[in-house]
Image (tube, rainbow, N blue to C red):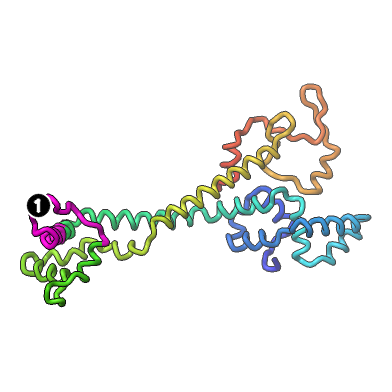
Amino acid sequence: LSRIKMEYADIATMVDLMESGKKFDATQLRALQEFLPTDEERQALKQYVAKASTSDETKAAAMNDLCACEQYMVAMMDVPNASNKFDCMLFRTLFESRLQEIMDEITKLNVACQEVRSSERLRKLMAIILTVGNQINTGGEGNSQAAGFSLDALLKLDEAKAFDKKTSVLFYLVKLIKENDEDLLKFTADITNVPEAQGLMIDSLFGDLKQMSSELGETQKTADEEADRLKDENGKFINYSRKKSLAELQAQKTSVHQKDGVDHFNMMESEDEVSTKELCVYYLSS
């Protein structure tokens, strides 16, 4: 906290608005979230501040006696749903980089798959392996010949031995191809992106996307709850473009304006209706 050069009250306002902008990175946001007061700490600090609030001087002195962490907790006590709002800010801050990382991996997989499917040399090589396998298993005759094989079967090519117990099927295949079409052994030139993609896990990518989708749902939920909080008794949105400071709220107590011949106390109404979706976009968009 000592490294953050920003008033704690301003941080509280920023979190309440869920607008970190470029002031804080993900690491700083996580640190600020970690120092949020627990229920017990909040209760103890409220009692401490209440006892010291007999005058502005005693309250200021009491606040100065608190450490930086406690002062931050006092500033954050009145921010509703603070932890979830931090989650929204973190999601927004990391969204582009996380999505780009996932898309990069998906692109690698797509390119590698396209290379495998389009390699003529690899296709011919697989056809030869299938033919040799059928020849070994069925003598190349009858209706029991396989129409294909699993990739796991390729691993067994080096395990199956000839009658001499030394020559493997893999060795025989390489010898056969060298004698007939040695160019097929250069198939690796057609699949240059496969080695880079072989370490990627499709299940992991799906898991990351599912996690982001879940976090987006939680962000939407928090935005909806904030939207409900920002509505007045008539269901209209209060002006949420800027939260007022404590001093402004105190000054607002005497604010009265008339609308349609009726006195309104401390009311800020938005002229236009704002949908929940628009409010969500407001908090998520830069």
> Residue 88: horizontal and vertical position, in percent?
60, 50
Q: In percent of the image, x 10 and y 66: which residue is there?
A: 177
| Crowd rating for badge 1 (residues with CA inside 10 Å; few <14, some 14–19, many 20+) | few
Relative horizontal placement of residue 72, taking residue 167 as reference (left or right): right
> Residue 241: horizontal and vertical position, in percent?
66, 42
Most foreground residue, 3 or 73? 73
Circle count: 1
Q: Is residue 195 visible?
A: yes
Q: In percent of the image, x 80 and y 27: which residue is there?
A: 258
Which residue reaches farthest right?
54
Which residue reaches farthest left?
180
Q: In percent of the image, x 76 and y 56: which residue is there?
A: 39
> Residue 32: horizontal and vertical position, in percent?
67, 60
Relative horizontal placement of residue 279, taking residue 113 as reference (left or right): right
> Residue 195: horizontal and vertical position, in percent?
30, 65
Rendered view: 89 above or below 155: above
Which region of the structure is painted magenta?
A: 127-152
Most foreground residue, 19 or 91? 91
The residue beneath circle 1 is 142
> On the image, which quarter does residue 102 sit in?
bottom left
Q: Secondary structure at mark 1?
A: loop
Whether residue 47 appears in magenta in the rendering, the answer is no
Q: Amino acid at mark 1?
A: Gly
Q: Quadrant of the N terminus?
A: bottom right
Q: Is residue 121 visible?
A: no
Which residue reaches farthest top?
261
Relative horizontal placement of residue 112, taking residue 269 as reference (left or right): left
Rendered view: 182 above or below 88: below
Relative horizontal placement of residue 249, taking residue 223 as reference (left or right): right
